[in-house]
Amino acid sequence: MDIRMETVPPAQRKAKPDEKSLGFGRIFTDHMFVMAYTADRGWHDPHIRPYGHFSLDPAAMVLHYGQAIFEGLKAYRGEDNGIRLFRPQANLERMNRSATRMCMPTLPLDTALAGLQVLLKVDSDWVPRAQGATLYIRPTMVATEAGLGVRPAKEYLFFIILSPVGAYYPEGFNPVKIFVTDTYVRAVAGGVGEAKTAGNYAASIMAAVEAQKQGFTQVLWLDARERRYVEEVGTMNIFFVLGDRVVTPPLSGSILPGITRESVLQLLGDWGLAVEERPITIDEVLAANQRGELREVFGTGTAAVISPVGSLHYKGQDCLINGGKTGELAQRLFNELTAIQYGRKADPHQWVLRL
Ligand code: COI
């Protein structure tokens, strides 16, 4: 499919922000990629247009029944000034799995990837130069058909927006304080927990707000049935270093199949470390910490990258991990992943797509 271009005249483009104080997801670039779907025409009219408002019917089905899915990936500017994407095909493939789960149409992957690349070329000046800053990419699909019957919509919009970002957490790469909730649950087996759908994030907000009021960065979710097994943290998957083994919960259907998670598992395997994807209870984690065997806890995610966990708060008790300091393995993984993403190191798994 040809991509139609409607660009902003250079003199009318926005001023670039100060890269030292970007925050996360507050500033958007000059353009976006948009493609429409109708049941009779399929996906059509892929185009680049100025970033701006959509006009939506108040009965648009996304506003009522939440058919909305999204992805998150990043573009990195290397020291050679080259722009690199990290595993964009994996993100788009995951988006199609989310689409299938939410009864939404799957994307033509070649057009979606071409649209992303054209968009990045048009807005390439927005890929930050400052260390630690990246261009966050948010592909999104929503149901636009007007109607109040509960059924799959027949019309959708797919769009990609871009946002220059700094660290996701105010802590940056410093250890975060996590609240383990046994009051709320995020997802149940058989539900939509493994789809990257908006409702999963809406469902998480109340627990996150309550945790933040008490001074915690994010919530760690336990399984919905027994409230014993660790699932994931608000915006990241979670790993535990127990003695010389690295343990992470398996993809049981209720947690997000993270692309950073998968990349970390690959790197740990490359380094010859013992990795276990298996159910792990919060009691096992805390008991190991008491015995001095819990060496590190860290989260993984596109926005969060590798985020060391300094403490877990569970049932009124604070459990300090690794003295509240960043662990060796979290640091090594952060260094390795970012070196590959910025093109400072070889990319043995062909994860990087150069623009
Ligand atoms: C990401 O890591 O890209 C995510 O999608 C998390 C986001 C909700 C901030």
Image (spheres, rainbow, N blue to C red):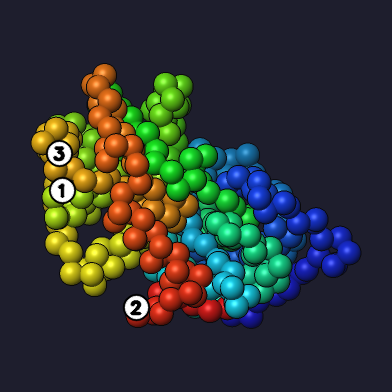
Q: Quadrant of the C terminus?
A: bottom right
Give the number of the mark in front: 3 or 2: 3
How far across and how far down the image is residue 135, in percent?
A: 59, 60
Cα distance between the residues tagged 3 and 2: 35 Å
Q: In the current view of this chain or complex, which residue is farthest to the top?
A: 316
Quickly name the residue at label 1: 242
Is residue 264 left or right of 77 when viewed as pictured?
left
- Give the numbered dot on residue 292: 3
Q: Which of marks 3 and 1 is nearer the N terminus?
A: 1
Q: Are marks 3 and 2 in contact (CB under 8 Å)?
A: no
Please tell me which residue lies in front, 331 or 26.
331
Give the secondary structure at mark 2.
loop
What residue is rendered at 26% in x and 50% in y?
239
Q: Earlier in the sequence, mark 1 or mark 2?
A: 1
Cα distance between the residues tagged 3 and 1: 9 Å
The amino acid type, in three-letter code, at marker 1 is Leu
The amino acid type, in three-letter code, at marker 3 is Gly
Cα distance between the residues tagged 1 and 2: 27 Å
> Does residue 242 appear anywhere in the picture?
yes
How far across and how far down the image is residue 267, in percent?
A: 28, 68
